[in-house]
Amino acid sequence: MTETEAEIVPGRRREVMVVLPGLMLAIMLAMLDNMIVGTAMPRIVGELGGLAHLSWVVTAYVLGTTVSTPIWGKIGDLYGRKTIFLASIAIFMIGSALCGMAGSDLLGGTDGGMGELIGFRAIQGLGAGGLMVNAMAIIGDLVPPRERGRYQGIMAAIMSLAMVAGPLVGGFITDNLDWRWAFYVNLPIGAVAFVWLLLRLHLPKYRTEHRIDWWGAGLLAVGITALVLITTWGGTEYDWTSWQILGLAAVAVVTLAIFIPVQRRVAEPIMPLHVFRDRNFTLVSLIGFLLGFAMFGAINFLPLFQQTVQGASATNSGLLLLPMMAAMMVVSLFVGQAITKTGKYKIWPIAGGVFMAFAMWLLSLQDVNTTTWQTGVFIAVLGLGMGGLMQTTMLIAQNSVEQKDLGVASSASTFFRSIGGSFGVSVFGAVFNHHLSANLTDRLGPQAAAMAEGGGGGGRLDPTALAALPAPVREGFLSSLADSISSVFLWAIFFAVLVPLLAAFIKQIPLRSGPSAPPADSGGDGAADGKAQEGPKDGTVKDAAPVAAFD
């Protein structure tokens, strides 16, 4: 086999195709949940109250995903991805079941239902952190980088389909069933994925002695949580100069400052710093952060705009997202095939970043008079950008490290995108709340602003409640909502334009064409290249001989 042919042996290709359905179902779990919940959020707020806490339902999920992603990736490298992957699916399903019960009689009634939902979303996020990173790492175990674009393109297309199906399913559930089924629907999908992978996924084991970097994991979790709380509470719940915000800032600085020397000293660092010596890896990590910040932080408000300002039903708001998802799916498949055929990838994150920045500008122009077809065109442009960015950042990250660090590279790529999304949701949520309060105060007075923030039960103002308001008051609310959501997209532009600028500095390094996964009789689930995990120079961790066993 020549490098230009870049073919996978037939047995390995069959193995990939057998495993792929289970991996796609697992990815669909996370993607479906995000989109279903986004569509159902106005109805959830209507029942549980607390419009001002809307962003926290997303923030808790993203935060749980963010702090757990590096841990999932590392322990997958160390202990084998199959068991770890199945554990993440199980935790995600438990979190989904608990979210569906939030505020119900099963948990003591509706008082504090929003708080329960936020807490359970964090549990759900802990499981979700292992879904995407381990799915991508398993593909990386089985497929060389040159061929990886094709399979990651397929998985990106499945993500797009899930993002299409999510709003439709969420809209149907919201309009015809209880919103709780937006979470319960994850249970049968998760069960099928769990059983399929339990029976069909067979990765060769590699036995090693390990030392988990619990200190690094704990420091990273505390530091990131403190940063997210700062961006969430600063200027809204507490003044920027309050002791709460300054205390959180001190915690973030101290923990992250300690984290770096800890990573240099421990035997098995949760995030090995040597991978950041590669310029491409560092660049795509920054791009992933900005991608998550601008994209996930902003599009969280699209269903709210469509259902409240444009008057779409929950089902129709799902249909209105079809242009974005269709554009993303088509571009993802095209880019995956193009990378596999040519080996060239640098142009795609540049083009994707340009389209994303342009889409944010278009979306910032929306107001109460924006039609649904105009919004459809705007988000289709956003889908073009997403299709060029989502898979290429992961591919470049994986191609920039040794195979033994594949799980770390996959988790780091997902981590920076997740932490960007977490910061984005928090920051844009604060921007939205600030502008909404100011706009309502200007148009309708401080009492209306207090209602929207939850005072006097007004936090339960869903589309149905808004429709019952007197016409002048309703118009004031809708104008204030539209202006506040547009301000979110306006702020997103400043972060989106940095993506193509950074992507321009990516160096075109040839994708590895040879087999990167271990052959069937060697290597390991834990060590992706079939070699012993490299221990520290002091020899504190020793590798044992490979065993002829499969999990």
Image (cartoon, grey):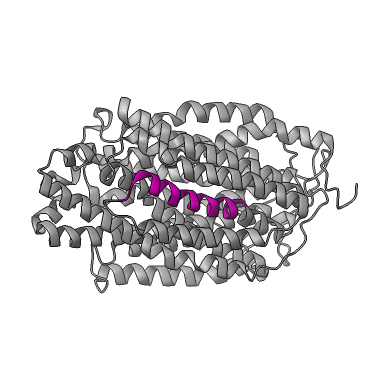
Left or right? Give the position of 125 relative to 386: left
Look at 29% across and 48% down and name the residue there.
54
Which residue extends farthest bottom?
241
Residue 91 x/y as whole percent: 48, 38
Look at 43% across and 34% down and name the residue there.
94
As displayed, is residue 284 above or below residue 369?
A: below
Camera sees residue 406? yes
Camera sees residue 178? no
As displayed, is residue 247 above or below residue 12?
A: below
Of the 4 image quadrants, the one containing the C terminus is top right
Q: In which quarter of the image is residue 21?
A: top right
Q: Which of 276 and 390 is in front in this view?
A: 390
Left or right? Give the position of 468 relative to 131: left
Q: Which of 212 and 10 is in front in this view?
A: 10
As displayed, is residue 126 above or below residue 260?
A: above
Residue 192 x/y as whole percent: 55, 26
Q: Which region shows up in magenta?
A: 370-391
Magenta span main SS: helix
Left or right? Give the position of 382 relative to 40: right
Which residue extends farthest right?
1
Look at 55% across and 70% down and name the residue there.
260
- Total marks shown come to 0
Residue 334 x/y as whole percent: 66, 47
Look at the image and say whether residue 300 sits in the magenta stretch: no
As displayed, is residue 402 above or below residue 167?
A: below
Q: Which of 244 and 153 is in front in this view?
A: 153
Q: In which quarter of the image is residue 87?
A: top right
Look at 59% across and 54% down and name the residue there.
388
Residue 176 x/y as whole percent: 32, 25
